[in-house]
Amino acid sequence: MSQTLYLKAVQHHRAGELSQAEALYQQLLASNPKHADTLHMLGLVYYQTGRNAQAVAAISQALATSPKHADYLNHYALALRENGQADAAIKSFQQAVLLSPRDLDIQINLANTLLMAERFEEAAGYYRRILRMRPRHDDVRDALLHCLVSLGNQAHAAGNFVQAEACFAEALQFNTRDASIYYNLGNAQRELGKTVQAATHYAQSIALNPNDADAYNNLGNVQRESGQLDLAIASYQKALLLNPQLYHAKAHLIHQKQHICDWDGLDHEIAEIRDYVHSVPQAQISPFAFLSMSGTTAAEQKQCADNWVRNRYAALFEHAKTANFSYTAKPKKIRVGYMSADFRLHPLAFLISELIELHDRSQFEIIGFSYGVNDKSDARKRLEKAFDQFHDIRLLSEIDAAKKINALGIDILVDLTGFTQTSRSGIAALRPAPISISWLGFPGTMGALNGKPIFDYLLTDEFITPEISARHYAEKLLCLPNCYQPNDRKRPLAKTPTRADCGLPEHAFVFCCFNQTFKISADFFNSWMRILKATPNSVLWLLECNRWAKQNLLAQALQHGIDAERIIFAPRVAIADHLARHAHADLFLDTAPYNAHTTCSDALWMGVPLLTCAGDTFASRVAGSLLTAAGLTELITYSIEDYENKALHLAQNPALLSSMKQKLIKEKTTSPLFDTQQFSVALERIYQKIWAEYCIDSNQNCL
């Protein structure tokens, strides 16, 4: 009788007559309350009628009797999922899959639940498995596509660009008509330095969605990084035509116009950017590009950095709270980690190498973390050898890199890149070390979010950041005694070329500026032209950065009545050859508001006096700091008028200029500017001081 009643209940159930089925199931259970099939089917009715808590209760009783029944587990999991118990549902589905591995419906249910729980990687694994058995299952293909895109976005946000690239590339197997997939693939490839592939995918995205301003902006970014500055400018202009409120594209456009020395309309465009920094905090204006914009103040640069941090780092600040890194502090050597994208043939490497070699290993362990390209140069090899440990973290996500740094017990983490190209300062924002310092790479504040800075400290000196300027920096200022910049006394030096080798007239007075062209402003170039006019038989020797800048500078010179033959361009050469050719320069004319930094050190090291014009920002005071340490404060001016007059005075007084050259050459080995051993000791005292303060403040016995 009970079996007949059960079959009748099932018949009603299959016919969709759920109330009749439910009544019969209840009747059966009244006489046999532990009948597993009946409990399961009643639970299924509850599930189908939205009574999920009752469904969970009924099917769990069925499982108590028959715990290894795949159908029970599958329906139990469905009820759990609808009851808001996703994790428990996933476990139940997984048990069902083990019992019935060829039942694709169960696997689909599991994958869908994983997707709902945003466990994208696990979900993708099941979807792929299903498609291997049923390749034309459109719903599964669509679900896997959604999963891959979500996983790719998640990976990109976490800084795992290798995984992001793989996800978006796989997503294209399922949809080749979605512009956003090409766009996101391009974004991941750009982060990985694959500029050619990224440009291709941005172009494909634009072909599908020609009105996407962001795609044009990002195409401009990779064109810029590939040296195609004319194409980059055109892309930024197109982006702004499509979306005039794409503020970061305007900043990129200005910066590239500076690179090619196209100053037409620049003052107006810079004024707009300065206004955005004040009035549009969501505008993502690159802090690095902002540094070189004429007229910007230290207060504005701090506001720009704060805006950038708010827009780009808020999620990482939140992640830092959940990561909750622990710091095991105990009496030992202080472990200092230096982190950079530029441990390669790069000015940063030229400055830092000897310092790393000279650190006192009886007091410190020095560990390098590289997230830049390994160019296999001698500069790279020297640094790899100089560090006690050297870790390549380029392919790690921000969180994984932070975990590695924390696991290695770094006490003081020093970021040498900041907001320059290939910045990964988000690693420091995750707080993997108890103390973090910004130094060298980015000449300015790294900003703060709600008053909380990314970095605890900024390494500087008293000339660059006089006490009155502290309010313009988010970090606490650590002032080195002479100059914030280290130097390398082991710089390679080639044989001195002849003037003819350099394309220079044999007996002319040579003004030079080997700064990158984006640092050359119209005001200072105009000043240089007046200086040339007033100095017969003189030439201006500039670094040849790109062909567009060369053309524009020559055109500007002609407008000032200066013959093109008086503007001479030095091609890029190896650092040893570049240093050697300084022998033919008489006076280095600096730029502002972005001074010579490493190029200033190079000039002074080679005995070439440098004339600077200091402002109120970090980047505009670096050369003044170097000159102060070299004992040549008379070469620091504070207005273009004084700068111009001083240049003419020096050019007209060769004996005075010669005495300055002799001073630089004579004191090269004793000057505080080039005494790397003294610099190392001073820096280590600062490290010891802030470490002692941390140990006391945190009540830890680590001294």
Image (spheres, grey):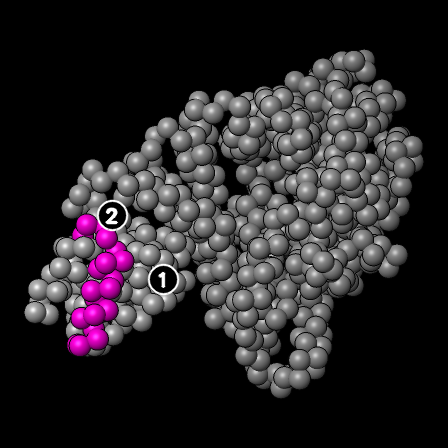
Q: What residue appears at the point 37 percent right and 67 percent down from the top-left corner?
A: 53
**Three-letter code for the amino acid on which mark 2 is drawn:** Arg
Image position, residue 242 (x, y; %): 60, 23
Residue 242 versus residue 462 in the image, above or below: above
Image position, residue 526 (x, y; %): 82, 24
Q: How packed is label 1: few (under 14 Cα within 10 Å), some, or many (20 or more)?
A: some
> Which quarter of the rendered picture does the N terminus lie within?
bottom left
Q: How packed is label 2: few (under 14 Cα within 10 Å), some, or many (20 or more)?
A: some
Residue 565 versus residue 260 in the image, above or below: above
Label 1, secondary structure: give it: loop
**Three-letter code for the amino acid on which mark 1 is drawn:** Arg
Residue 692 versus residue 298 in the image, above or below: below
Residue of label 1: 51
Image position, residue 40 (x, y; %): 22, 66
- Whichever of labels 2 and 1 marks the residue nearer the N terminus, that label is 1
Res 48 → quadrant = bottom left
User: Which numbered marker is on residue 128?
Assistant: 2
Q: Main secondary structure of the magenta part?
A: helix
* Magenta-colored stretch includes residue 19: yes
User: Which numbered marker is on residue 118?
Assistant: none
- Frontmost residue, 103 versus 600: 103
Whether residue 199 is visible to the viewer of this picture, yes or no, is: no
> Which quarter of the rendered picture does the C terminus lie within?
bottom right
Q: What residue appears at the point 26 percent right and 38 percent down from the top-left corner?
A: 138
Magenta stretch: give its range: 14-32
* Magenta-colored stretch includes residue 570: no
Distance (Cα) linking label 2 and label 1 = 33 Å
Image position, residue 316 (x, y; %): 57, 57
Are dots 2 and 1 in contact, CB under 8 Å? no
